[in-house]
Amino acid sequence: MPPAVMPWSPEHLRDPYPFYASLRESAPVLQVEPFRGAYAITRYDDITSVLKNPGIFSSARVEPVVSLTAESGEKARGYFGNSKNLISADPPEHTRLRALVGRAFTPRRVAELEPWMRSLTRELLERMLAREEFDLMAELAVPLPVTVISELLGVEPERRKDFKRWSDDVMKTMAMAVGTHDPAPILASLEEFHAYLKRIIEQRRREPREDLISALLEASEGYLEVPDLISFTRVLLVAGNETTASLLGNAMVALLRHPRELERLLENPSLTASTVEEALRYDGPLQALVRVTSEDTQVAGHRIPEGARVMLLLACANRDPRRFVEPDRFDITRDNPSSLSFGHGVHFCLGAPLARLEAKVVLEELVSRVRHVSFAPGQEQRLDWGDSLQLRGPRALRLRAERRPTP
């Protein structure tokens, strides 16, 4: 098959779904440029089959840093060493790591955060809604997950801004960005992040606390070394921060562009959980995953050679009409959306319950306070979706809201 050029551009990033639809219908598998002639997989059933087969479609073989120069990428990788990492491991190593992390990052630990998370959300909302016009991203969707993940990890409140900056810079080193970034400040930021985490981990070894880093140290019983813990923290920082903020922004944009669905939610707040699930399917924050084949294989009758990069277009699959009825319709009462936005199989996102809880709490608290919300004048036309082909979310989201009368 001749490689197809992917027309990724600011225009594409504003609305990739018509292009995804054409890819999905023209071929379940196609070789694409750029990205070293990777093979894109476009349909739901084929992607789930790939994700169920980590033996052939490997995470361990994926290069973690690709958007910097080769020399800068090597330096970036050097800050984290040959660490054990949930994302870049295959079974049986992945199985053992996930079991260890699962002992520390438990559903109970996440659930225990809800009262405090709800109180924080209320505080942020009250400040935000006190103004006629506000930026949902800057004032709620970004600070909430940064604060939550910092609390989980036991990070000092005064370092939360640093954590957000480090998270942004880690994202710049990840795969599939349209833009280019000056590597020097990114590398300096990674070095700073590494040094900070190393210091915190050593402190927790000496004096454990009631935080996730201490729990990981206890659960691993020495199996996880400092580079491993740094690597896990880096993954959790991005997964628990960037994806949650983007989920909140995408959900609000979808609701505002579908006023009838927004009205249904305002009238019936019990629909918050199903709204979160539909937002994940309709316009999820994680658009794609990458795997590398460990042997010659076939997908949907198409040969893919050993060592090939495979792009799993999750967002494309989430609108596959073979799986979803009227997939381009945003319906907050849709039964069993079953999106791939948190992955599938052994690599299903460990932080999914936390992201779902945060999004649900935000929507519940927001709809209890407002009876109408809208884009600020001109905002919908000026939405900036950033330059990542892997993570999708608005950089800013200026809104106006009319509060409910005080009882």
Image (cartoon, rainbow, N blue to C red):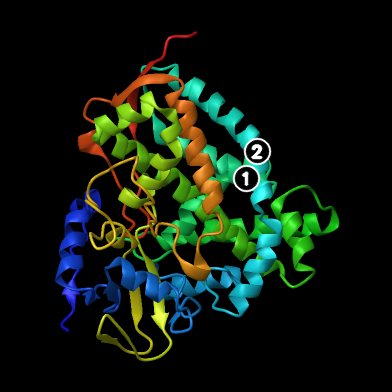
Task: Say whether marks 2 and 1 touch (CB < 8 Å).
Answer: yes
Please identify the quarter of the rendering in which residue 100 is found: bottom right
Residue at 60% of width from left, 35% of height from top?
Answer: 117
Which label sits in the foreground, 2 or 1? 1
Is 75 on the left or on the right of 24, as rendered?
Answer: right
Q: Which residue is mark 2?
A: 157
Identified by mark 2, the residue type is Pro
Residue 191 point in image, percent of width and height = 58, 61
Identified by mark 1, the residue type is Ser
Residue 387 point in image, percent of width and height = 31, 54
Is 19 on the left or on the right of 213, as rendered?
Answer: left
Q: Which residue is mark 1?
A: 150
Is 61 on the left or on the right of 162, as rendered?
Answer: left
Which one is nearer the viewer's eye here, 269 or 379?
Answer: 269
- Quick check: 167 above or below 380? below
Please identify the quarter of the rendering in which residue 38 is found: bottom left
Query: Farthest residue in the right direction?
Result: 206
Query: Does residue 69 appear in the picture of this structure?
Result: no
- Quick check: 49 above or below 248? below
Residue at 33% of width from left, 29% of height from top?
Answer: 264
- Mark closest to the chain's N terminus, 2 or 1: 1
Residue 405 point in image, percent of width and height = 43, 9
Give the distance between the C-alpha atoms of the residues marked 2 and 1, in whole angstroms: 8 Å
Count residues near mark 2 (Cα–Cα under 10 Å), then give few for <14, some for 14-19, many for 20+: few
